[in-house]
Image (cartoon, rainbow, N blue to C red):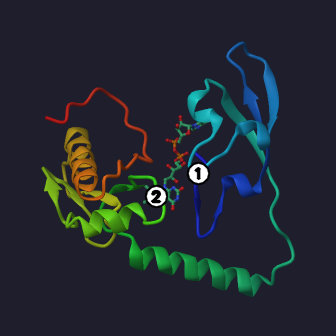
Amino acid sequence: MNAGAHGSDTQTILVSTDVLNPDGSLETLTSDQLQFKYRTSMLQSDPRIVTQATFQLEPGHDPNVVRAETAADLEQRRTTQPYHLPSCGSVFRNPQPKSAGWLIEQSGLKGFKVGQAQVAERHANFILNCGGATASDIFKLIRHIQDIVDDRWSLQLRPEVQILGDFQAA
Ligand SMILES: Cc1cc2nc3c(=O)[nH]c(=O)nc-3n(C[C@H](O)[C@H](O)[C@H](O)COP(=O)(O)OP(=O)(O)OC[C@H]3O[C@@H](n4cnc5c(N)ncnc54)[C@H](O)[C@@H]3O)c2cc1C
């Protein structure tokens, strides 16, 4: 899914992956062949299974600088994202130029609940399970957010998470 944060992503450091093809053969794919884009790669619509990956990290930093940068990134996440209740992380991809969280917050949806699923007060692009939320609660809340943001900004938010199953919004 080309996960990333703090100005970098998987694509930036991945050199190649070994994959198992449906016919049982093994193949090595380069980063270019994986067709990475923002939070996507061709693996999401492909039956091949990754068995191994080679990453190229960047050497030469002072360990103290690395520790300080890591601590600052962790602190930034802890203070801007909710970690006190379960969530699946960011729900929607970020459109340009405004983030999904900003659009949802400006639509007045922080704290909005469907059943036990709630738009987080700390970061509006997170949906929290406040205890016993069902997948259906979360799906309905996703649809509600999309409708409100579309009404207000004429913009269709696209989920970053993958939705499995046959859910009804009504
Ligand atoms: C609290 C929280 C915060 C998060 N913050 C961020 C963030 O800042 N940035 C970000 O980008 N994401 C973020 N995420 C999302 C998370 O990083 C991604 O969902 C991540 O890719 C999940 O990886 P996984 O292996 O745990 O998930 P999985 O569900 O196991 O895998 C994700 C996808 O990869 C496929 N897959 C898994 N294994 C293989 C394999 N061997 N071969 C081929 N395909 C495979 C699965 O089928 C699925 O489509 C966050 C999630 C949470 C819960």
Residue 83 seen in render? no
Residue lying at 34% horizontally and 60% vertically, measured from the top left: 126
Give me the residue at 62% from left, 68% from top.
Answer: 7
Q: Is residue 39 above or below residue 20?
A: below
Quarter of the figure with the N terminus: top right
Question: Which residue type does callout 2 highlight?
Answer: Asn
* Along the line of sight, the residue nearer the viewer: 155 or 90: 155
In this rendered view, identify the residue nearer to me: 74 or 122. Answer: 122
Q: Answer with mark 2 or mark 1, whichever residue precedes in sequence.
A: 1
Q: Is mark 2 within 8 Å of ligand 1?
A: no
Tag 1: Cα neighbours inside 10 Å, few (<14), some, or many (≥20)?
some
Residue 38 is tagged as 1
Q: Residue reaching furthest right?
A: 60
Q: Residue furthest front?
A: 154
Q: Residues within 10 Å of mark 2 (few under 14, many from 20)?
A: many
Residue 16 in picture, x, y percent from top left: 80, 43
> Pointer 2: what residue?
94
Amino acid type for the residue under numbered disc 1: Tyr
Q: Position of residue 75 (x, y in %)?
A: 49, 80
User: Does the Cβ of the disc 1 residue fall within 8 Å of ligand 1?
Assistant: no
Q: CA distance from mark 2 to mark 1?
A: 9 Å
Rendered-image quadrant of the C terminus: top left
The local secondary structure at tag 2 comes to: loop
The secondary element bearing badge 1 is classed as loop
Q: In the drawing, does residue 149 fall left or right of residue 63?
A: left
